[in-house]
Amino acid sequence: MAERNASKSTTFNETEPVSPSQLQEVTLDPDATNLSRDFSCFAPKSPSDLTSGRTVKEIDEQLSSLKKENFNLKLRLYFIEERMGSNLNVDNEDVIQKNIELQFELANVQKELESKQELLCQAAKVMEIEDEEHKKEISEKNRELCCLKERIEEMRFQLEKDEKDNTREELWTEAFNLDAQRTTSPEMIKKLQATIIDLQNELKQTREEADQLRSIADNAQTKWKHLELQIAPVDALKEELSKKSSIIDSLRRSSTQKNSELHDVKLQLKDIQNLYDSLIVRSEVDQSPSKSNNECGPLNATGQLIPEEVTELKKNHFKACKIIKTMIHKKKDYVDQIEKLQKMVQEGADEIQSLKKKICDMTNNTQFESNKKSIKDKVSELNLTAGWHPSSSIEEFWIFALNGHKTPYVRNLQNTHKANTK
């Protein structure tokens, strides 16, 4: 009995009964008493059957039906447990045997359900893979279709172009009757050959002229570079001149400032000298006994000066002497500084004059060289023009043309020409 009760308790724990409150919408099948059921319809099928003839929707419907059947089995177990609780007098061995059969059936159903779920997952994966492959095939087909459309367009464009070319050739043949001219007009061929030769000669002449222009441009560029190289030191000297002029301006400003300060010092010295003279006069007045008490200042009872007044006068005298000495030293310093600044200004002016001379010399040299080169160029041009007039001599022609230029080069040429004529 104990073993039966233990098996009974294990069956109740394994079946996990469901409360009736959770089963409100479920109706019991009238054939629920019959516990033997054929589960042959839940036998697993091959994945090819799932992927070939069944869709995902059908597999979901089958899964939902299996869940309902599992629920019905649990409900039957629940009612069997209630009957076992009410009918205690029923034979326990039959109940245990039925319970074992039900557990066995439930285990089989759960295994089948798990296998169905696995098959469903596999089928879903296969469907996804097939869907991806189908999408890839569609994209490849679309690409091929686009390529074919482009090729068709190209072929159509080429066909239209060929048709236009054919029509153009037909028009040319109709307009000029080339076939007839090939057989009947050798004179026309000769004329065309002559025109071709003339065009070739003109092309050669234009190429030679272009080469000459290129050489002239290259020469001008080299001359320009040479002039730039000559102008570069002039620019550097100009920059140095501007720097020197700025330094001289600053020195002049400082010299004017020092002169103003020296003027102020001179005024202060004059004031101090006047004060010093007044103090000396006052001391002489204090020392002279012939003057009255009103003129001398305040006297004491004995008729002498007050010592406070004497000390104050001495202090003022000492201060005046000290100020005079400092002013004299400052005056000397200012004079020295002014002399130094004047020397620096003079040196800067001399440097500026030398730089200006250098700049003038360099500009004169560059102008002379440029005039010389321009004259040589004119001479070469005039030689060319004189070559066009063989009646006159070349030298007479360009010497007459250069009478207005008074350069040494032209003068030498004129003198040599005169000597030759004599």
Image (tube, helix red, strand yellow):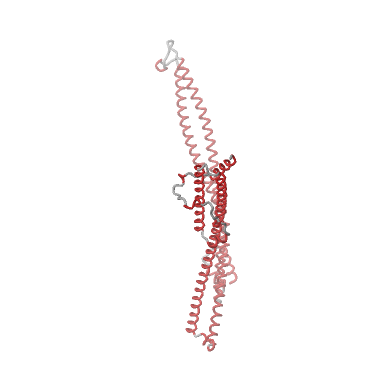
Residue 234 in sight in this render: no
Q: Residue at x 54, y 50 (%)?
A: 239
For the C terminus, give its image quadrant: bottom right
Q: Nearer the viewer, residue 236 or 394?
A: 236
Q: Residue at x 54, y 76 (%)?
A: 202
Q: Position of residue 376 (x, y in %)?
A: 57, 66
Q: Position of residue 297 (x, y in %)?
A: 41, 17
Q: Nearer the viewer, residue 95 or 225?
A: 95
Q: Position of residue 92 (x, y in %)?
A: 56, 44
For the N terminus, give its image quadrant: top right
- Name the side, left or right, on which 140 lies relative to 301: right
Q: Residue at x 46, y 29 (%)?
A: 270
Q: Nearer the viewer, residue 191 or 186?
A: 186
Q: Is residue 263 above or below residue 104?
A: above
Tally the marks: 0
Q: Nearer the viewer, residue 52 or 254?
A: 52
Q: Is residue 382 above or below residue 130?
A: below
* Direction bottom: furthest residue: 184
- The image quadrant that residue 299 belongs to is top left
Residue 345 in sight in this render: yes
* Direction left: furthest residue: 294
Q: Position of residue 362 (x, y in %)?
A: 56, 55
